[in-house]
Structure formats: structure tokens, C-alpha cells
Amino acid sequence: MAAAPQLPTREDYLACLAETPRTVATASGPVEYAQRGTGEAVLAVHGTLGGWDQGLVAGEFLRVNGFRIIAPSRPGYLGTPLSTGRTFPEQGDALAALLDALGIERIIVIAASGGGPASYELAARHPDRVRKLVEVDAVCIPGRPPRLASNLLAWDWAAKMQLWLLRQAPRQALGALMGGAGTESRAVVSARAKELAAIPGRTDTMEATLRASLGAKRRRAGMKNDYTELVPAALERITCPTLIVHARSDRVAPPANAEYAHARIAGSELYWMDGSHVAIALEAADTAPAHVVSWLRGDG
């Protein structure tokens, strides 16, 4: 029987946020990245309003289970200029160029939310570079994404308020985070928030994710670029083993995104989580990360 996957601690997440990124010259332009751990390499592609810090936080559950996490800042975020890749095909090429600069032939890729388009492009345009692909609540349907966070200047204030609530009133904070990103009734969300708030350490991942999205001014160009018209990646060209993890009640990246990708990527596996856009960090934190680790290890 395979060993049960480990879960990160609050101290692990603090160590993620304390890492120092570096910038390398690539054929596509400068790319900022940070890394943690040893073992097989995993490229962690962050979502909208992220950066290398959010990538490290999102991949920390893999690091504590024996993987090495390489987390780039996508173009327009933190230290990677938007000129490195304005379009998502260019961002996919930039990720491949980063692998070239780091001397990595093939790698596991995990992406979340707004990191979906760039990671899907990487796997479709450079199929020989991706060994396995994991997509979590990832965007991929053609068109212009809904603008749910148009006031970037207010984001830092809102994130800091949510961080304060997580410490002072976790039930209310979790209810707001899940209710603001899901489709379930207020009563269902409130009951679930009460249950989750009573579990020690359950808010750690969400707290670290919020901290890894502060400083909106340094992420603004990338976020605005993420809301441009999405031209569909050639998902049919993806040949690596692919795991699509998605929340059933996600309204930020609706479940139709998962169904769209699953229908076009031959042999892909679709794993549903119950909950909202933050389910992997909250509602499904005790099951979904374990499934991803098991799938990557080939257990079962």
C-alpha cells in the first residue's frame, strides 16, 4: 500500500514566501522563477494575480511529498516583463525556453486557474517537454473571461481584510471565500464554513495563497493581459498523461472548462471536487491533493 501523502504546515508556507527568486535570460526574454525541494521537477504555473510566490504555495503539497518545485512568474507578473509573452502561445513558448535555460528536457507541469492557457499551450506546442500535466480549475474555453476583479487597486485591501478575518473570525472568512467563488446556497456554504473552520490547519493554504497575491501593482500588467480574448489552444495535440481537477461549483472558472479540455485531450482523467474555486485549498484539501500525488506517483 502506498504511503499517505504529507500535507504542508504553516511553517512550510512561510518558507515558500521567504524564498528569493532569480531571473534568467531565455530565448523568449527574461523569466523570473523560484524553486524549492529536491526530486523530480514540477513546473508550477500560477493563476491570475499570482507570481512565483503563488506558484510555490500551490506546489508545496508536492514538495513535501518528494518533488522539486520550479515556479516561474508569467509575463506581466512581478519580475517577468510582459514583453516575454503577451499571447498565451508566446507564454507557452516562454515556459519551454525557461526549461532550455535550466537544462531540463522533460518535466511534470501543474497549473491553476488563469495559468491554464499558458500551460495548455506548453503541452500542445512542445509535447516532447511535458511528461505529465495536471490542471486545477484551469481556464481553457475560448472567449473573453469574466472580469470578476476589475478594481485592482482595491485587491490588496480586500486580501488584507480576508487575512485578518481568517485569524479573527475564520468561519466568516471561509464563508466569504467559498460563497464568493461558488454556486451553492448561503446556508450550505455557511454550514460547510463552520465545519472547515473547526479543522486545525485547514486555513493555512488559503492564508498563504492570499499572502502570495498581495502587491497588485506589480501584478497588474499580467492580470490585465489574462483578461484578453482567449484563442483556444490545440488541446487535441496534447499527448502526455493529463489529470484535470475541477470544482463542481466553481463560477470563476466554470466546470465547462474541465469538460471542454477532457473532451479534447485523449486519455485525460477528470477528477471532480465538491466546492468552489478554492476547493483544493479548503473544501477538498483532505482529498484532492492526495489524489494528485497518487496520480503522479502512479499509485493505485
Image (tube, rainbow, N blue to C red):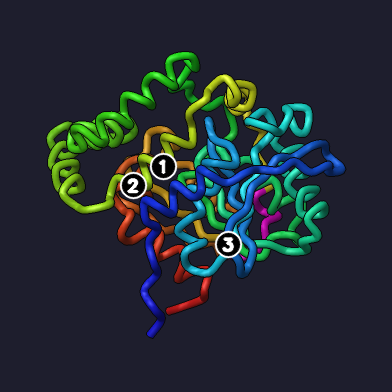
| 3D distance between C-alphas at marks 1 and 2 | 6 Å
Magenta-tinted stretch: 235-241
The quadrant in which residue 174 appears is top left
Callout 1 environment at 10 Å: few (<14), some (14 to 19), or many (20+)? many
Look at the image and tell me in which quarter the C terminus lies.
Answer: bottom left
Callout 3 environment at 10 Å: few (<14), some (14 to 19), or many (20+)? some
Residue 21 x %, y %: 65, 43
Query: What label sits on residue 208 in the rendered view?
Result: 1
Of the image marks 2 and 3, the number of the one nearer the N terminus: 3
Question: Dot 3: what SS?
Answer: loop
Left or right of 170 in this view: 11: right
The quadrant in which residue 8 appears is bottom left
Q: How many marks?
A: 3
Q: Along the line of sight, which residue is nearer the eye, 214 or 146? A: 214
Residue 168 x %, y %: 20, 32
Q: Are marks 3 and 1 in contact (CB under 8 Å)?
A: no
Left or right of 298 in this view: 88: right
Kind of residue at disc 1: Ala
Residue 86 on the magenta segment: no
Q: Which residue is mark 2?
A: 204
Q: Are marks 1 and 2 in contact (CB under 8 Å)?
A: yes
Query: What label sits on residue 37 in the rendered view?
Result: 3
Residue 193 vertical position relative to residue 7 in the rendered view, above or below: above
